[in-house]
Image (cartoon, rainbow, N blue to C red):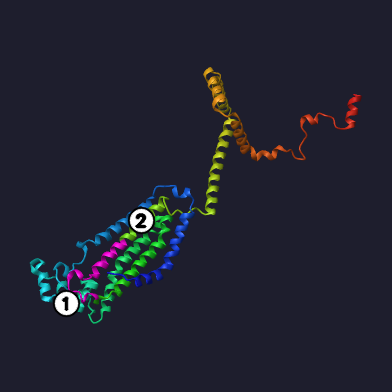
Amino acid sequence: MAIDWGTIKSLLIFFGPLLLPKAISYYRSVRAAPHTHRLKVIPLSPTLVRAIAILISVSLIFLLRTLPIFSPENIFTITQSRLQIPTEVLFNRLSSLRPLNTLTPLDLALKSKFTSLESRLLYLQFGPDVLGNCPFCNSDDPTSYLYYAIPSILTPHVFNLVVITLVTSNLFSGEKAATWRTPAAIAAVVLTVLDLYLTSSFNHQTNASRLRLPDLEFFFWTSRLLRFSGLAFLDISLAGVTYLTGTNRAFVIPPSPAEKIETVLKGLGNIKGKLNAAGVVKNTVTRDEGLRGRSNAYWGHEVRLTREMMEEEDVVRGMNDALENRLDIKALERDAEEYTKGVLGGLSAFNTAPAFAAPSPATASVPTTPTTAGHQKED
């Protein structure tokens, strides 16, 4: 089944404006995502595992449908007969392959249709079921066979579209799988339109002048193979990108500023709650006489142990060696000063006393008026 360049060009012109902006937006989102977001791998959620399992199962079903055992048989292939073979000779060969040399009802229906070359050509385009079971079709109007074949062509596409919309729904799989809902649905529709277009545009008369069996183009069987293979590839691709998105391995969209602010506020709220709880515990310990005594005893014991340890000769010698040979005292002092400024930076406003502040005790003890000084001298 050959596709000429004009067909490809027409499809690109029609579907390019739909798919190209999506591809560009996803590429830009990946490029714009911070490096940390792309590399932060997380495990798959149970909902995504279920969605991926469904997609893989459906793709395996489509791949099984491509096997010859599940494909409608081709009379010309199994009998190794050319297209122009007499009808009686063809079905005599076919009956020899059947149990008890009997033909099936479909074989008998095809036998009545194979009296003309046009019917055989349509058989290669639409397959045995359409040619043998269509009640209103005739070879003088090939379009009637297309109308009868459309439901069988659309059935796997519609089924796959239902599966895709289910596994990419927000309620079924979550937000990460839902991001692929629109691209997957567009890809499914593109496959459907392409399948219908190729089937309707195929010229069945191309096989009329081909005398040898290997030269025949079995369009129905080739298109069926490509149809199920394309659907399987679509489902496997969707499962792959869902896995990459669900584990943050690729296609990670960074959170918006509003989401970042909400996350920070939530974290600050958790920290405030913990600080409040710590304050409640500290107040409880301070107010209770027994707990306060146990706390003081604990810290007194800790201070005593630390003092005794620091007074040991080996510890003193080791600290002196470290201070003299290994540690940069100035760097330590600088780091300590920066840390202190960072912790107490918010209290810098209290370093300057306000205009209405009370005088210090030293200032208050010094007489400031001549009257006061005179009285003191007289006394």
Q: Residue at x 22, y 80 (%)?
A: 139
State left or right for residue 93 relative to residue 248: left
**What residue would you read off at disc 1?**
114
The amino acid type found where label 1 is placed reads: Phe
Tag 2 residue: 239
Percent of width and height locating residue 67 = 22, 61
Q: Quadrant of residue 361?
A: top right
- Determine whether, in the image, residue 138 is placed left or right of residue 287: left
Q: Is residue 208 left or right of residue 347?
A: left
Q: Main secondary structure of the magenta part?
A: helix
User: Which structural element holds mark 2?
Assistant: helix
Identify the secondary structure beneath mark 1: loop
- In the picture, the quarter occupied by the N terminus is bottom left
Q: Is-magenta flag for residue 29?
A: no
Q: Give the magenta-colored segment's residue range.
A: 206-231
Residue 286: give its label.
none
